[in-house]
Image (cartoon, rainbow, N blue to C red):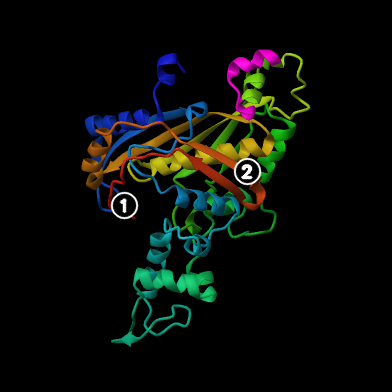
Amino acid sequence: MTKEEQDFTIDERYQELLQTILDFGIEKKDRTGTGTKSIFGYTIRHDMTQGFPLLTTKKMAYKSMITELKWFLKGDTNIKYLVDNNCNIWNGDAYKQYSMYAGNLEEPDYDVHVEDVQENRVRILTEKEFVERIKTDDEFAEKWGELGPIYGKQWRSWSPVAGDINKGGKDQIANLIKELKTNPDSRRLMVSAWNVGELSEMTLPPCHYGFQIYTTELTLKERQEEFCHRLGKDISFAKNLEHLDLDKDNVPKRKISLMWNQRSVDVFLGLPFNIASYALLLELIGREVNMIPDQLIGNLGDTHLYLNHLEQAKEQISREPNLLPEMQVRNVDILNGEFEYSLFEYWPHKKIKAPLSN
């Protein structure tokens, strides 16, 4: 990465991508029926030392992003945890599955929990009613809140045989943490969500389908600077640390980068969320293995704006970026999907509303 590239903020890189799609994107049909302007093959990157990459050119629902990441890390695939924590990202996918099945029933079905029957057809709950039932009825949630073997299942219990939910499942996150601690220079530090044997059982095949970790050793100067940062001291203070035992103070010896791969990229609504989510995952892994977050890189495949997001994209391009916030994580228990966090100095522009295409 050149010095010029380093000077761009994540907001500016994102605005550049929006403009590139508006200028050069090809109109295509898509499964939602909305239509897109699309380009293929794009890389976006962020230097984590610049701040936490939560876009400032529009207000982001970062609490939902955090809840979803915890859900993934727990290995959960049922929306009840999300609903109980006021995260509605996956409600539409679960509801679509429910309504398709319930609409084909000729007789009342206990599992559907219909309110009445009209003309020998089941009355399908509205999405609002459906979500409320998920929240209040555990039995209903167990059946209709399940999305199949999506991200959490693949991250925490990869099965080589379709339908093998728990038998012999490979915990990719646990294996990654172990490998980082014992063999940090490995080129096999990867996690995949694209399990060909289970794609047909997923409500939605993974859009971001895998990530890879890369680590390098810190120089003595970089370790001293990190120690200064922890003390809240200016970097110039490092000259006083020549005889300090940095190992005794558990100062990291390595920095860590993450690159994720994404086959389908909803640039206006989804990508800002993906950037922040993988940045947070990088922070968590770094804390778990005592390494400093360095580079965040996204390799993007079909990179598109929905046709009903074009005006919103133009509005976001017109906005001046603010300074990025700082994210601090603590009490990290990554294998149980638990951590605490604090977000400082997040001053975004107002939210830009845009319709969701399912």
For the question of whether residue 264 can be seen, the reply is no
Is mark 1 in CB contact (under 8 Å) with mark 2? no
Magenta run includes residue 130: no
Q: Position of residue 242 (x, y in %)?
A: 72, 13
* Tag 2 residue: 330
Q: Secondary structure at mark 1?
A: loop
Q: Secondary structure at mark 2?
A: strand
- Nearer the camera: disc 1 or disc 2: 2
Quarter holding the C terminus is bottom left
Q: Main secondary structure of the magenta part?
A: helix
Q: Amino acid at mark 2?
A: Arg
Q: Amino acid at mark 1?
A: Arg
Give the quarter of the image for residue 321.
top left
Residue at 62% x, 59% y is: 165
Residue at 70% x, 54% y is: 168
Q: Reading the chain from its start, which is encountered first: label 1 or label 2?
A: 1
* Tag 1 residue: 31
Q: Position of residue 63 (x, y in %)?
A: 47, 50
Residue at 40% x, 71% y is: 130
Residue at 23% x, 37% y is: 314
Q: Position of residue 35 (x, y in %)?
A: 25, 47
Give the quarter of the image for residue 212.
top right
- Residues in magenta? 229-240
Which mark is drawn over residue 231?
A: none
Give the quarter of the image for residue 312.
top left
Q: CA distance from mark 1 to mark 2?
A: 41 Å
Residue sitting nearer the eye, 6 or 299: 6
Left or right of 68 on screen, residue 217: right
Badge 1 density bin: few <14, some 14–19, many ≥20, Cα 10 Å: few
Residue sitting nearer the eye, 327 or 120: 327
Magenta run includes residue 238: yes
